[in-house]
Amino acid sequence: MMWPTWISLFTRTHCVARGLRPNTIAVYQRALEAFADYVRSRLDDPPPDAIQMRDVLGYVEYLRSERGNGDSIIQRHVVILRSFYRAMTAMGQIDPDQNPLAQFPKIKAPSRKLPRVLDPREMKRLLDAPAPDSVLGLRDRAILHLLYGTGIRATECAGLREADVDLREQTIRVRGKGGHERILPLNDSVQRVLEAYRTVRGDVAPTSSFFLTRLRERPSRFLIYERVRTASRRARLRGDISPHRLRHTFATHLVRAGVGLVTLRDLLGHRLLTSTQLYLHVTAQDLREAAEKHPIARLAPKVAALLPDGKLPLHHSPTAFRPRYG
């Protein structure tokens, strides 16, 4: 019974002390339980303090070959196992030389794909998709405007309380990862849409959720995702449109407007500037527009001016060029 005890000790003590969000702790727990199941079914159920590096290497191969997992998922499992054993070492459950991941080889980082963002015309179609003739329609419009207008995450949007929204000062208070809070400004457009929803929603207690479900309950993160996808289908947009894609769109549009990375980092709630540097990417359209601005278009002769009236020979004429020697 050591695996359930150690996993519970890790999630309820170490993860809570670090201030990890419940969703993150649940991911950690599922990953550790998956490793424990592998140990029980493939390795004759050794306890956590008897695991060797070769056992973890075998688990990585199992994830890749039998489960068909990619580099991103495999790296996540290794990171969680490394954090688990580091915590168990710090708690005195195992000696440092018993940590099977102390000298574990570095897993190749997955290739980072550039996020696909919506262009302004697509964003307008999405923002206008929910019908404004019902409370839920105005709520969905407010959710979309807030996600795109501030770049907040779906979890942050779902956890927004009435007291966090100050429409007079045009600010919202957001609780991000690790419990970190930040104050974000609202522009006039977002402020008006939130005000319209608040008016038809009615008064609620300051500690109540700002957005309410049909049953006037606090929305979940998954409901925010579902409402964005429903609006994208109504707007007939291609691809998987999610709150996180709206976050990417918010950041990319600000970079194109000239907003600096330090300001963008604070708006997005990133702890490290390296996370924000992702938005220094350029799209194919950006490259095309840059190429069209090159002065060669003014300096080089037109192709039509290079072509003679008659037909050109396939090769240079033998008499056209005679090299000199000596």
Image: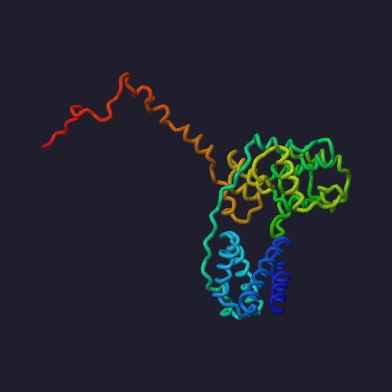
Residue most extreme to the top:
309
* Residue 61 placement (x, y as % from top left): 55, 67
User: Relative to 77, is 312 on the left or the right?
Assistant: left
Residue most extreme to the left:
326
Q: How many marks?
A: 0
Eyeballing the image, is 184 above or below 103? above
**Between 160 and 231, the one nearer to me in the picture:** 231
* Residue 158 placement (x, y as % from top left): 77, 51
* Residue 268 placement (x, y as % from top left): 65, 50
**Between 18 and 289, the one nearer to me in the picture:** 289
* Residue 10 placement (x, y as % from top left): 69, 72
Eyeballing the image, is 293 above or below 34? above
* Residue 19 makes an appearance in the image: no
- Quarter assignment of residue 2: bottom right
User: Relative to 312, is 294 on the left or the right?
Assistant: right
User: Relative to 292, is 304 on the left or the right?
Assistant: left
Residue at image coords 58%, 59%: 72
Residue at image coords 86%, 40%: 200
* Residue 128 makes an appearance in the image: yes
- Specify the color scheme: rainbow
- Quarter assignment of residue 95: bottom right
Eyeballing the image, is 318 above or below 21? above
Q: Quadrant of the N terminus?
A: bottom right
Q: Quadrant of the C terminus?
A: top left
Residue at image coords 88%, 51%: 205
